């Protein structure tokens, strides 16, 4: 990290350097990524974006890059087994958010990043009616699609749908606890020692592991649905929308009738 910081701080076009993720939260372990954030002057932003892979080579021996040339980020994998996720920003791109609460700022002479962090610390997360509506209807859609794929013996597709069902439960637990959910499908810090889930929720996740056959996958789905119904009702109460058990049961009966 010292090499990264020395390289960037010496660049007159760099306005700020800071870390997010587990470094910002002070919860790193041997396998943590380096979530690097770099704020640059507007006039040179495109140059930094175009040269992001070349810049990463300044910090060590790169084995390979994960990169989409048109984006503002690049991921470098080094021969030391360290992975650096680098995002480049213009100053105006940084706005107060839940994700800006936990940062490690190493260079911020104008105090801009620190100001954003202080504003972000005043924010809290509560799910919206729209979020819960999207969450529950996507859950219903994953359940129905899972059943279609099982009936066609498309097991790989069915597994994908079942994983989405399980992850939907994780997102709902986060919302119900007043925690901003990860991007859908991002399992970072959901399991293991750094998980913010309750022990009983982690136990359920372990019980929802399944074998790659139709019978076991259907068993897991049936075990998930009662937990969803409890969570669905609680989230409806949180955002003050109607919980209609008859509607919910009618949706599930379409796929459970022949199971």
Image (cartoon, rainbow, N blue to C red):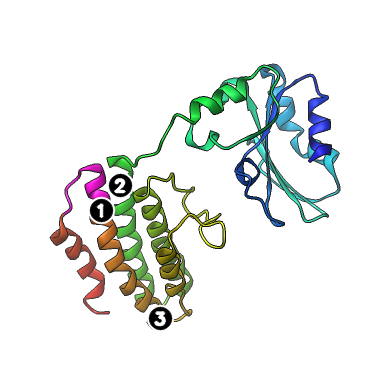
Mark 1 neighbour class, 10 Å CA radius: few under 14, some 14 to 19, many 20 or more: some
Mark 3 neighbour class, 10 Å CA radius: few under 14, some 14 to 19, many 20 or more: some
Choose between 65 and 129: the one closer to the eye: 129
User: Tag 1, which secondary structure?
Assistant: helix
**Which numbered disc, 3 or 1, marks the residue closer to the eye?**
1
How far apart are the two marked residues, 3 and 1, measured between alpha carbons? 28 Å
Mark 2 neighbour class, 10 Å CA radius: few under 14, some 14 to 19, many 20 or more: many
Choose between 123 and 65: the one closer to the eye: 123
Above or below, 76 against 219 in this view is above
The mark found on residue 234 in the picture is 1
Residue 213 visible in this rendered orientation of the protein: yes
Q: Which residues are magenta?
A: 235-243
- Disc on the earlier residue, 3 or 2: 2
Above or below, 221 against 4 in this view is below
Q: Which residue is mark 3?
A: 216
- Disc on the earlier residue, 3 or 1: 3
- Disc on the earlier residue, 1 or 2: 2
The mark found on residue 40 in the picture is none
User: Tag 3, which secondary structure?
Assistant: helix
Q: Which residue is mark 2?
A: 132
How far apart are the two marked residues, 1 and 2, measured between alpha carbons? 11 Å
Image mark count: 3
Residue 239 colored in magenta in the image: yes
Residue in the picture at 57% in, 20% down: 92
């Amino acid at each position: 990290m010292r090499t990264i910081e020395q390289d960037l701080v010496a660049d007159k076009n760099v306005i700020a350097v800071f870390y997010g993720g587990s470094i910002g939260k002070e919860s790193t372990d041997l396998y943590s990524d380096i979530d690097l954030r770099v704020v640059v002057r507007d006039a040179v932003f495109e140059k930094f974006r175009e040269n992001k892979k070349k810049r990463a080579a300044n910090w060590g021996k790169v084995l390979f890059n994960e990169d989409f040339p048109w984006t503002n980020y690049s991921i470098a994998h080094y021969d030391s087994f360290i992975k650096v996720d680098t995002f480049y920003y213009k100053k105006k791109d940084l706005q107060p958010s839940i994700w800006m609460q936990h940062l490690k700022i190493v260079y911020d002479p104008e105090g801009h990043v620190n100001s954003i962090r202080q504003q972000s610390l005043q924010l809290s997360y509560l799910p919206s009616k729209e979020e819960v509506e999207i969450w529950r209807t996507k859950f219903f859609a994953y359940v129905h699609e899972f059943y279609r794929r099982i009936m066609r013996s498309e097991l790989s597709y069915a597994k994908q749908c079942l994983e989405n069902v399980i992850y939907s439960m994780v997102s709902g637990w986060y919302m119900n606890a007043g925690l901003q959910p990860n991007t859908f499908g991002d399992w970072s810090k959901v399991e293991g020692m750094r998980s913010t889930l309750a022990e009983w929720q982690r136990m359920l996740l372990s019980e929802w592991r399944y074998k790659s056959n139709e019978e076991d996958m259907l068993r897991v789905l049936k075990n998930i649905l009662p937990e969803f119904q409890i969570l669905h009702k609680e989230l409806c109460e949180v955002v003050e929308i109607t919980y209609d058990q008859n509607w919910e049961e009618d949706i599930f009966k379409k796929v459970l009738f022949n199971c």
